[in-house]
Image (spheres, helix red, strand yellow):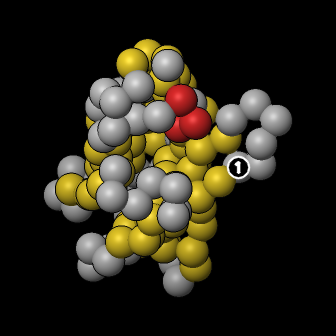
């Protein structure tokens, strides 16, 4: 089974920065797409940014130009660099990793990390 451990969340003032990490562990898997989601109280879960195994990236319009997603394939770790944070970025951030094993694909989720941006 794949285990995902998230870290890097916290409280930051508007305009500040945070860097989230999501470390994956599990043998016998091929790690494909890796994605960051977020969910604020009363809101639906939102896709924030995604990165393919080859490094192609996509971002939600609300974070373009401010957030950068990256991955270290050697460490099976996903990152989200968040700059120019706004109060609207306040949410629980979840990483999602799509893996392949035995010819089938599966999604695994991290435990979530809280990001709070104060005005």
Residue beneath the point at 46% across and 60% down: 49
Residue 69: x and y in percent read 33, 56
Q: Within 10 Å of the Cα at label 1, are there few (<14), some (14-19), or many (20+) other Cα atoms?
A: some
Q: From this viewpoint, which residue is outermost toward the bottom?
A: 103
Q: Is residue 73 left or right of residue 20?
A: left
Residue at 39% from the left image edge and 19% from the top image edge: 13
Label 1 sits on residue: 45
Asked if one can make out residue 79 in the rendered structure from this viewpoint, the answer is: yes
**Is 61 or 27 nearer to us in this picture?**
61
Instruction: Please tell me whether residue 38 is drawn above or below residue 33 in the rendered image.
Output: above
**Of 57 and 117, the residue lying toward us:** 117
Task: Look at 53% across and 83% down and name the residue there.
Answer: 103
* Horizontal arrangement in the rendering, residue 96 relative to residue 73 (left or right): right
> What secondary structure is found at the residue carrying circle 1?
loop
Give the residue at the far left of this rendering. Answer: 74
Image height of 113 relative to 31, above or below: above
Pick the front one: 89 or 6:
89
């Amino acid at each position: 089974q794949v285990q995902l451990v998230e870290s890097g969340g916290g409280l930051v003032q508007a305009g500040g920065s945070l860097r989230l990490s999501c470390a994956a562990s599990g043998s016998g898997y091929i790690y494909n797409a890796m994605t960051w989601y977020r969910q604020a109280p009363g809101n639906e879960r939102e896709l924030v940014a995604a990165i393919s195994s080859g490094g192609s990236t996509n971002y939600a319009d609300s974070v373009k130009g401010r957030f950068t997603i990256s991955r270290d394939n050697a460490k099976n770790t996903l990152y989200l660099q968040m700059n120019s944070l706004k109060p609207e970025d306040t949410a629980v951030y979840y990483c999602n990793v799509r893996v392949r094993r035995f010819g089938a694909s599966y999604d695994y989720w991290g435990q979530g990390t809280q990001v709070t941006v104060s005005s």
